[in-house]
Image: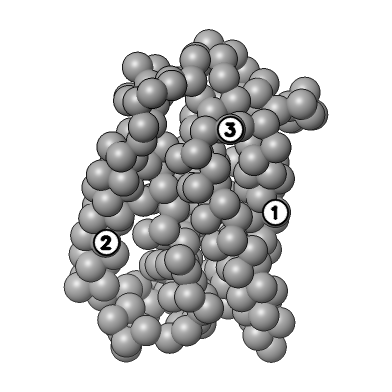
Amino acid sequence: MTAPATTDSEYDETPAAPDEGGRAPASRYGVLALAIMLVVGLLLGYAGGLLTPRITRPGDASVEAGFARDMTTHHAQAVEMSLIAYRSATLPEVRQIAVDIATGQQGEIGAMQTWLREWGLSPTGSKPPMSWMSDGATVKDGLMPGMATPQQMTALRNAQGIEVDRQFLTLMYDHHLGGIHMIDAALGETDNDEVLRVANTMKATQQTELNNLRQLQAQAKG
């Protein structure tokens, strides 16, 4: 689903003149193009989710519902981090993988939210996050596996220059490791064909991205 991080001319625009803070903002065209891609990805995800079979519908406390809700939250943070990296990262390859992650995970959010609607369930449940997982009790401060803390997110927003690249790559690497842990838990418990299909695709994509992130970490070290 996501190709290895490469420089894509559509997103690798020549940086504009640095602002007073010393950071070169992305061009308006690039930001608009990414925004359009995120909307399209979300709509495609919704459309894909509409194909979910209606023969059996998971219940509110099911593994499937918990996975869809918690992975939506998990993905949303990845999209947020990727948008920060796209706007502010120094290396074109980092900006490209940020685009890939943001658009891919936004589409998956659309699919998971469509599942919940098709199952007649609300986007949020009454149980604590990760309660559907056998090791869900290990969640600290409401953060799912691999998620960045509020302090880490603030540091990423405030970072400048190559430090943006480095922080993003570190945070996203951990984020993907945590995401794969959640995916494996769902794969081990569900027998829903659509959830299995999407979860397996997620895992394959994130494993590929982990390799790319590791390579970019070495590049960002200089």
Mark 2 crowd level (few <14, some 14–19, many ≥20, 10 Å Cα): some
25 or 192: nearer the viewer:
192
Mark before the other along the chain sequence, 2 or 3: 2
Relative to 189, say whether 79 is above or below. below
Q: Which residue is mark 2?
A: 37
Q: How is the image coloured?
A: one colour
Whether residue 177 is visible, yes or no, is: yes
Placement of the N terminus among the 4 image quadrants: bottom left
Q: Position of residue 33 (x, y in %)?
A: 23, 68
Callout 3 amino acid: Asp
Q: Position of residue 176 (x, y in %)?
A: 63, 55
Helix, strand, or loop for circle 3? loop
Callout 2 amino acid: Met
Mark 1 crowd level (few <14, some 14–19, many ≥20, 10 Å Cα): some
Q: Quadrant of residue 173?
A: bottom right
Q: Which residue is mark 3?
A: 191
Q: Position of residue 222 (x, y in %)?
A: 69, 88
Mark before the other along the chain sequence, 2 or 1: 2
Q: Relative to 42, is 149 on the left or the right?
A: right
Relative to 55, say whether 202 is above or below. below
